[in-house]
């Protein structure tokens, strides 16, 4: 399977090229950079630091449309939507790791998934996807007596908050408790907020230094507290998951899938 990486010189882009190079059964078909990048024409393997791979970086998907079967996209919401529309038009599968899409943008991605298969997940690591299962179980057992708070920390460059993973964790817990996250989420308290309400789910965000990604979900009541914690120490965990998703997409029909589908966790 030939895989293309867009945003190839980004934090995830370089890890994705490395993960594709390490994997069996997939190889790098194309690498796409922002138009105007000084790296256009450079070897994608050298951009990623894995040595020459014989794939010169290009400035658009149109420049490499015949060179890939599946695109991996960890970029920005606006660009991801353009890429998904391109893939739908050209019958290519796409793995989307981009976070920070609003509801309207997610609806557009769902439209594209009617024409070609998409794996879309805010976190591609096996550990986080297992954690989502643990959270649903914990919430079902603990019920409304336990206050739920979600704390996440990421590097100083991250542009969206809370993280896509934290929001997905909130959705999973809310669903297990029979709540709608849109109605019960509270983001970053400040000032005279009043006492906590029983059914709110709180989100706290830390942005600092080079933190790869940490998520901690608290279930706290009088007398005890459970914390379910996931800490990523390398972006390769996300990249390997995305490459696994790309392989899994081979032969799939159009539709919207997530990492729970890829990992058979549903
Ligand atoms: N689902 C998951 O498991 C994970 C998701 N993410 C998400 O992935 C996204 C990217 O994160 P990260 O890699 O840290 O961010 P980066 O900013 O490092 O990477 C984004 C890349 O996209 C490039 N880009 C921007 N515009 C274009 C364009 N028009 N054409 C081609 N490339 C373009 C940028 O280029 P330039 O630098 O030149 O602007 C940059 O290299 C975020 O939404 C993040 O939250 C991150 C990790 C894991
Ligand atoms: O921007 C990041 O770095 C990450 N983003 C994802 C998110 O928003 O959940 C996943 C991971 O935690 C790293």
Image (cartoon, rainbow, N blue to C red):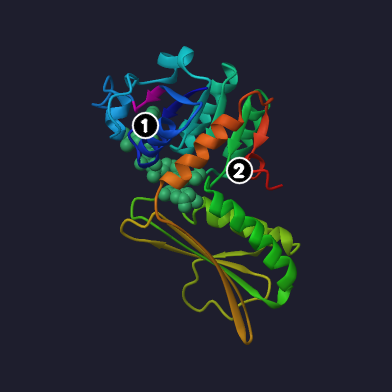
Mark yes or no: residue 182 visible: no
Quick check: which quadrant has ligand 1?
Answer: top left
The extreme right residue here reads 178
Kindly state the secondary structure of the residue where label 2 is placed. Answer: helix
Q: Quadrant of residue 258?
A: top right
Q: Residue furthest front?
A: 24
Badge 2 density bin: few <14, some 14–19, many ≥20, Cα 10 Å: many
Q: Is residue 138 above or below residue 7?
A: below
> Farthest residue in the bottom direction?
223
Q: Which residue is mark 1?
A: 8
Q: Is mark 1 within 8 Å of ligand 1?
A: yes
Across and down, in percent, residue 30 comes to 41, 21
Quadrant in which residue 244 is drawn: top right
| Residue 16 % position (x, y) | 42, 36
Few, some or many residues within 10 Å of mark 1 (<14, 14–19, 20+):
many
Among numbered discs 1 and 2, the one appearing first in the sequence: 1
154 inside magenta stretch = no
How many discs mark residues in the rendered view? 2
Residue at x 65%, y 45% (from the top left corner): 260
Which of the numbered marks, if any, corresponds to residue 229?
none
Tell me the residue at 53%/20% (across/down): 69
- The Cα–Cα distance between marks 1 and 2, rounded to whole angstroms, is 22 Å
User: From which residue to which does the magenta span run?
Assistant: 30-34
Q: Which residue is mark 2?
A: 259
- Where is residue 242? Give x, y as percent: 51, 38
Question: Closest to the observer: 44 or 77?
Answer: 44
In terms of image quadrants, where is residue 92? top right
Q: Residue at x 38, y 35 (%)?
A: 18
């Amino acid at each position: 399977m030939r895989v293309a990486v867009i945003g190839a010189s980004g934090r995830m882009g370089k890890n994705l090229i490395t993960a594709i190079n390490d994997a069996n059964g997939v190889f790098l078909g194309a690498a796409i950079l922002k138009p105007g990048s000084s790296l256009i024409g450079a070897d994608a393997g050298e951009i990623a630091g894995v040595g020459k791979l014989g794939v010169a970086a290009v400035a658009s998907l149109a420049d490499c449309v015949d060179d890939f079967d599946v695109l991996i996209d960890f970029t920005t919401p606006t660009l991801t939507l353009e890429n998904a529309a391109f893939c739908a038009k050209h019958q290519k599968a796409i793995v989307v790791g981009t976070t920070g899409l609003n509801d309207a943008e997610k609806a557009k991605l769902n439209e594209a998934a009617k024409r070609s298969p998409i794996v879309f997940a805010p976190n591609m690591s096996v550990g986080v996807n297992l954690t989502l299962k643990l959270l649903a179980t914990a919430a079902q057992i603990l019920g409304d007596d336990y206050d739920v708070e979600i704390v996440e920390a990421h590097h100083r460059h991250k542009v969206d908050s809370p993280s896509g993973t934290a929001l997905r964790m909130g959705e999973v817990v809310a669903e297990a408790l029979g709540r709608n996250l849109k109605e019960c989420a509270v983001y970053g308290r400040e000032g005279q907020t009043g006492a906590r309400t029983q059914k709110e789910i709180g989100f706290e965000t830390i942005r600092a230094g080079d933190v790869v990604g940490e998520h901690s979900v608290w279930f706290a009541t009088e007398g005890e507290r459970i914390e379910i914690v996931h800490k990523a120490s390398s972006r390769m965990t996300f990249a390997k998951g995305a490459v696994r998703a790309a392989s899994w997409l081979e032969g799939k029909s159009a539709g919207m899938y997530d990492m729970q589908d890829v990992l058979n966790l549903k």
